[in-house]
Amino acid sequence: MIGEIVVAESFKLGLTEAFNFLKSKSSSFKNPHKVDIEQAYLKASNVENVKTIWQVDKSVNLNDFYYPSNIIVKGKVIQVESLDIFPKNGKIVIQGTAGQGKSILLRHLAGVTLKRSKVVPLFIELRKITDKTDLPTLICQSLNELGINSTEKDLEHIYASNQFSLLFDAFDEIPEHNLKDTLRYIESICATYYQQQILITSRPGSEIQKVPAFEVFNLEQIELSDFKPMLLKFFNNDDVTV
């Protein structure tokens, strides 16, 4: 219970600062109703609930089985524990092969940020992009779930606030005919809002890796030494079963 209160206060501080900044910039954010911080946190924390091959009938919290991921930076292996290892204005692509844990890592980072930082993470699944639902629309939907009612024209204030981190999952899953427009929009954010942090996961060989604004880091492959500690997480530390 104490942990939840601490989390709520941390999230409340970041969301309140963001909302106050936005209200000072645009009348469209001057909502007469108060933002429900508790509901906003509960909705945001859903990013940690996933279905796995171990349990397909219902969602589980990824913290029950999460095993730390590493990236390779200039030949060195670095454990990705939070967004703090990246520059606050970083434009980062984390690339890895299918099933390597890219999405779980990004969800983990969103969850950690909710608990420890005043920055508000916006986790966006790029596979949801369609002809009728583009990336700005998905970002607005994510903001609306937090109680920040936004339209595409309001996003300039979101990016300028430096209160949000954009976490875009699975660039390689964007439908082919929506790819150019999505890439163009991401590049426009990079060009206009230098301080905006963006993390994107993707398989190797996607167009996002070619964008000069982005640094590309490889997710480290699982080694034999990782098998037992990882399986212990999956099987509740049952050493006999593992």
Image (tube, helix red, strand yellow):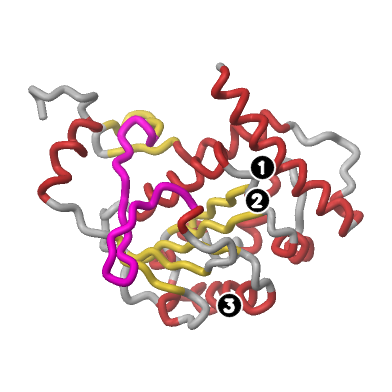
- The residue beneath circle 3 is 187
- The residue beneath circle 2 is 141
Q: Position of residue 20 (x, y in %)?
A: 83, 47
Q: Is residue 196 above or below residue 59?
A: below
Viewer-proximal residue among 76 and 110? 76
Quarter residue 186 falls in = bottom right
Labels 3, 1: front one: 3
- The residue beneath circle 1 is 145
Q: Position of residue 69 (x, y in %)?
A: 31, 50
Q: Residue at x 16, y 22 (%)?
A: 238
Q: Position of residue 174 (x, y in %)?
A: 45, 66
Q: How far is disc 1 from disc 2 in space, using C-alphas?
A: 6 Å
Point out the stretch of residues depicted in magenta: 62-83
Extreme top residue here? 1
Q: Residues within 10 Å of mark 3 (few under 14, many from 20)?
A: some
Q: How far is disc 3 from disc 1 in space, using C-alphas?
A: 25 Å
Quarter residue 6 falls in = top right
Amino acid carrying label 3: it is: Glu
Q: Is residue 135 above or below residue 68?
A: below
Q: Is residue 67 above or below residue 78?
A: above
- Residues at discs 1 and 2 in contact (Cβ within 8 Å): yes
Q: How far is disc 2 from disc 3 in space, using C-alphas?
A: 21 Å
- Check if residue 81 falls in the magenta segment: yes
Q: Residues within 10 Å of mark 2 (few under 14, many from 20)?
A: some
Q: Position of residue 88 (x, y in %)?
A: 58, 61
